[in-house]
Image: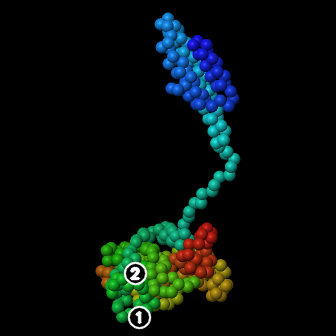
Amino acid sequence: MRETLEKIKSEALLALSAPDAQIEELRIKYLGKKGELTAVLRGMGKLTPEERPVIGQLANDVRAEIEAKIEELSSAAKAKELENKLKSEKLDVTIPGEKTEIGHFHPLALVQRQLEDIFLGMGYSIVDGPEVELDYYNFQALNIPKDHPARDTQDTFYITENILLRSQTSPVQARVMEKTQPPIKIISPGRVYRSDAVDATHSPLFHQLEGLVIDKGITMGDLKGALEMFAKRMFGESTQIRFRPHHFPFTEPSAEVDVSCFLCGGKGCRFCKGEGWIEILGAGMVHPNVLRNCGIDPEVYSGFAFGLGVERIALLKYHIDDMRLLYENDVRFLNQF
Ligand code: DAH
């Protein structure tokens, strides 16, 4: 039996030391329940009581030696595996990185922010108003009764007879005056709607910025000064402004305001269509009826208002010749800003 044990030991160690040794298979072959060593131990009953502990001890030694060899081999295999993994998963810091695109503001948002900055710098505060508006604020409070022809050019989308999508930012004037006594100095940018078909210069949704200043002794000179300062900040120090008589139901007198062409400086070019001037907004002195409608005494207070189209400013500033580009969200266009 001693010889059998020695033989198992030397065979097992030899088999395990082969370079392509299948460790798990060999473990089962020699140490498993149906393995060679177990088979020998089963035969121990036939030994004499004196032989039994000696052979038992030897069997244990053989098992321990084979187990130690297996343990040594499998931890070497694990180390080898780890080493291979570290080698193959090596981080190459010289590979060019993947660029993440960072978003930015839409040209309309850029212009709106610039407009806001200019007027904030002149002491105006920003007020928001609802886009779904009452007919009363959009029209009636602004001196445009139900049958007034000025409604034709501001046809909009009606939710009910008296609720509509606002066609201008001017209703915010009425809302502010109703709630606040002068002095008032606000701008109100936002979306407005009209039932216009889409083309290069029209859209059923666009943006305006309204301005309103009410106090004692406000004159048309204040309006001119405010708009001149705005025009210089927006289009450059050499910009001039010009008032042309016009009609708005909510201002009296009313004017359309032009800026000198910031490309040719007023000489006339393709950009200003030879005019030297470019129309940018409507303005005027707030009509006494509007003040009265909103609970402000026109005998005590006066004020001016103006309204400009944000798209129009964006098209001028960035030399864009089709308004639709602003809404189509083509990244080839938007990436340029
Ligand atoms: N709301 C006018 C429009 O949409 C623009 C405007 C003109 C606003 C004169 C004003 C103003 O406040 O005084 O055409």
Say if 295 sits above or below 11 in the image.
below
Q: Measuring 54% from the left and 66% from the top, which residue is drawn there? A: 105
For numbered disc 1, what is the local secondary structure? Answer: helix
Compared across the picture, whether 54 is left or right of 158 comes to right
The mark found on residue 165 in the picture is: 2
- Here the colouring is rainbow
Counting the numbered discs, the total is 2
Q: Nearer the viewer, mark 2 or mark 1?
A: 2
Q: Would you say residue 227 is visible in this rendering?
A: no
Marks 2 & 1, CB-CB < 8 Å contact: no
Q: Tell me which numbered mark, 2 or 1, is placed earlier along the sequence.
A: 1
**Rendered location of residue 91, percent (x, y):** 65, 43
Q: Measuring 66% from the left and 41% from the top, which residue is drawn there? A: 88
Disc 2/disc 1 C-alpha distance (Å): 19 Å
Q: Which residue is mark 1?
A: 149
User: Looking at the rendering, which quadrant does residue 13 occupy?
Assistant: top right
**Rendered location of residue 21, percent (x, y):** 65, 29
Quarter of the image where the N terminus is located: top right
Q: Would you say residue 33 is visible in this rendering?
A: yes
Q: Residues within 10 Å of mark 2 (few under 14, many from 20)?
A: many
Query: Three-letter amino acid code at disc 1?
Result: Pro
Viewer-proximal residue among 325 and 46:
46
For numbered disc 2, what is the local secondary structure? Answer: strand
Viewer-proximal residue among 329 and 11:
11
